[in-house]
Image: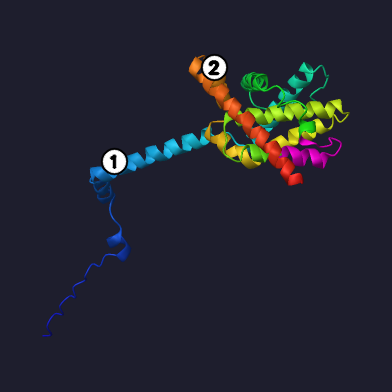
């Protein structure tokens, strides 16, 4: 009688992917047992990233700062022309920023400009004559304005110098209109906008935009006022130095 054959044992082999894939319980277990120090580091990193993004979002965009700079320049020039008894209309509309905010900035800029021009009235008058230039040429007006602006800010940026730049623009605009060249006003505005783009945008963004200038006129502390008067006097010296270097360059 033949012997019965032994049944072969069947080994159960798990699929490699199944054996390597962790279970849901395993994943949950790992997350629950992450060291507290690592969790704290992750939390702090998330908070820091959120703060960085919040600060970045508060920085005004470059295009907006330049548009505001040109709008403020038109306001400043318009105010100075009216004060000089000259009628001039602003054909370009205001920028899309809140009107009240830009109006407040413009008022502060004009106020500080009054302070500056009151201290040294002769410095910011007859700009074209001081520079010995003809206002009939757009290139000459542009080159002269940008040369003075560049020299004015060669040693750094302050609000006093920014106000001085607008005072120069206002004085030069008056000369252009008086000499029968009202179109040069737009050239001056465009030059100021271009200078802001190249030189002042980064500085303005760090300060949160043009509204930072309002802090200079809101404070009624006499010591703050004295500080601004001293700053203005120094700015006058920088402007005279800028004119001197412009003459040297022309020679």
Give the residue displayed 79% in from the left and 24% down from the top: 90
Q: Position of residue 106 (x, y in %)?
A: 65, 22
Of 18 and 156, which appears nearest the observer? 156
Residue 210 visible somewhere in the drawing: no
Residue at the disc numbered 1: 40
Viewer-proximal residue among 149 and 122: 122
Q: Which image quarter: residue 217?
A: top right
How packed mark 2 is, by other alpha carbons closer than 10 Å (few <14, some 14-19, many 20 or more), is few
Q: Is residue 199 visible?
A: yes
Residue 148 drawn in magenta: no
Q: Read off the magenta span.
A: 131-147
Residue 7 position in % (x across, y down)? 17, 75
Picture quadrant of residue 205: top right
Q: Tell me what residue is drawn at x 34 percent, y 39 percent.
A: 44
Check disc 2 and report the residue beneath it.
Answer: 218
Q: State left or right for residue 30 relative to residue 116.
A: left
Q: Earlier in the sequence, mark 1 or mark 2?
A: 1
**Residue lying at 82% horizontally and 39% vertically, measured from the top left:** 138
Relative height, residue 241 to residue 120 (above, below): below
- Under circle 1, the secondary element is helix
């Amino acid at each position: 009688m033949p012997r019965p054959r032994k049944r072969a044992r069947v080994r159960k082999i798990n699929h490699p992917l199944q054996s390597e894939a962790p279970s849901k319980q395993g994943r949950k277990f790992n997350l629950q047992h992450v060291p507290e120090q690592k969790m704290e580091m992750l939390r702090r990193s998330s908070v820091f990233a959120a703060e960085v993004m919040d600060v970045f979002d508060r920085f005004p965009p470059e295009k907006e700062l330049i548009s505001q700079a040109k709008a403020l320049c038109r306001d400043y020039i318009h105010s100075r022309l009216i004060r000089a008894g000259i009628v001039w209309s602003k054909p370009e509309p205001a920028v899309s920023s809140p009107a009240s905010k830009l109006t407040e900035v413009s008022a502060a800029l004009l106020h500080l400009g009054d302070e500056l021009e009151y201290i040294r009235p002769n410095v910011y008058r007859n700009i074209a004559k001081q520079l010995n230039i003809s206002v009939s040429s757009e290139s000459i007006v542009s080159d002269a304005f940008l040369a003075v602006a560049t020299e004015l800010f060669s040693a750094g940026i302050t609000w006093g110098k920014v106000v001085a730049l607008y005072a120069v623009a206002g004085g030069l605009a008056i000369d252009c209109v008086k000499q029968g060249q009202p179109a040069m006003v737009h050239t001056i505005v465009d030059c100021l906008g271009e200078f802001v783009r190249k030189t002042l945008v980064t500085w303005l963004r760090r300060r949160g935009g043009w509204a930072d200038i309002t802090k200079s006129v809101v404070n009624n502390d006499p010591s703050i006022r004295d500080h601004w008067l001293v700053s203005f006097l120094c700015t006058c010296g920088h402007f005279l130095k800028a004119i001197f270097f412009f003459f040297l360059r022309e020679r």
